[in-house]
Image (cartoon, rainbow, N blue to C red):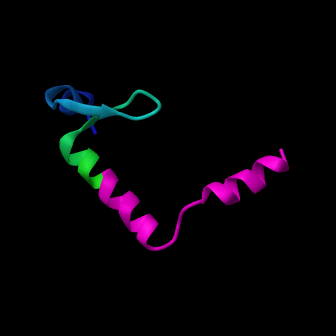
Amino acid sequence: MALKTILDKDAVAHTVNGYPVDKEEYILMVKEADERITSGNYTTIEDLEKEIENW
């Protein structure tokens, strides 16, 4: 997305890297995340705790 386009839209959130996210992009990100969760593509806290033990 071009910088001017980004600046012309109101940011409703920011990524962890500080990238501004407009409303349309935010809704798309939420829908994509919901699809990953629905398809089982996520890490449970139990799996994460097991993985941490090996760090």
Residue 25, relative to residue 18: is it above or below?
below
Q: Position of residue 45 (x, y in %)?
A: 62, 54
Residue 35, relative to residue 55: is it above or below?
below
- Residue at the far bottom in the pictured view: 39
Q: Residue at x 20, y 25 (%)?
A: 7
48 inside magenta stretch? yes
The quadrant in which residue 46 appears is: bottom right
Q: Residue at x 83, y 44 (%)?
A: 55
Q: How many marks?
A: 0
Q: Position of residue 47 (x, y in %)?
A: 69, 59
For the residue pair 37 and 23, the one nearer the viewer reads as: 37
Q: Residue at x 85, y 50 (%)?
A: 54
10 left or right of 21 in image: left
Residue 1, relative to residue 6: is it above or below?
below
Magenta-tinted stretch: 29-55
41 inside magenta stretch? yes
Magenta: main secondary structure: helix
For the residue pair 8 and 48, the one nearer the viewer reads as: 48
